[in-house]
Amino acid sequence: MIIELILLTKLMIEKGDQLARIKGDTFAVMFSGKDKNYAYKFASKLKKKVEEIPFQIDERVTCRFVVLPIDRWLSEEKLLLLAYEKLKLAKDYGKGVVL
C-alpha cells in the first residue's frame, strides 16, 4: 500500500516539489514557491484519490494530512516535532483529516 501511495503522490507533485519519507508510514511533500492554500488543496486532492484506490483489503484506507510552512529559522528537529504534534491532533479528529 505504501508503494502505491508513493507512486500516486509522485504522479501528482509538480517539477521542483519533493516527496520525502520521514519515518515509518510518515511522509512529507515539500512545495517549492507555493503558498499554504496550495498545500491544503493538494492534501485534499491526494486524500480523495487515496480513498478511491481499490486496495484488496476489507477496510477502507485513509490518511491524515497536516500542512506546515517551513520557516528557515526552524531547525529540522523543531519542524518534525511540530509536524508530529499536529498529526496527533489530526488523529483526535478522526480518519481522513487535513489540518
Image: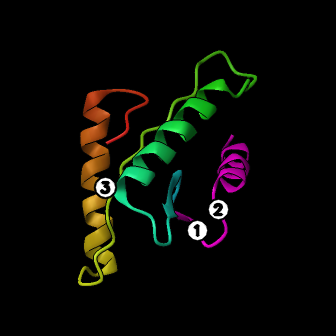
Q: Amino acid at mark 3?
A: Tyr
Q: Which mark is residue 84?
A: 3
Q: Which mark is residue 46?
A: none
Residue 92 forms part of the magenta stretch: no
Real-space Cα separation, disc 1 to disc 3, in angstroms: 21 Å
Crowd class of label 3 (few under 14; some 14 to 19; many from 20; radius 10 Å): some
Real-space Cα separation, disc 2 to disc 1, in angstroms: 6 Å
Q: Secondary structure at mark 2?
A: loop
Crowd class of label 1 (few under 14; some 14 to 19; many from 20; radius 10 Å): some
Q: Secondary structure at mark 1?
A: loop
Q: Quadrant of the C terminus?
A: top left
List x then y, in percent, for residue 61: 57, 27
Q: Secondary structure at mark 3?
A: helix
Circles 1 and 3: CB atoms closer than 8 Å: no
Q: Earlier in the sequence, mark 1 or mark 3?
A: 1
Task: Name the front one of labels 1 and 3.
Answer: 1
Relative to 38, residue 97 above or below? above
Residue 19 forms part of the magenta stretch: yes
- The residue that appears at 44% across and 52% down in the rendered structure is 38
Q: Amino acid at mark 1?
A: Asp
Judging by the rendered image, the residue that carries numbered circle 1 is 17
Judging by the rendered image, the residue that carries numbered circle 2 is 14
Real-space Cα separation, disc 3 to disc 2, in angstroms: 25 Å
Crowd class of label 2 (few under 14; some 14 to 19; many from 20; radius 10 Å): few
Q: How is the image coloured?
A: rainbow
Query: Which residues make up the magenta segment?
Result: 1-22
List x then y, in percent, for residue 93: 27, 29
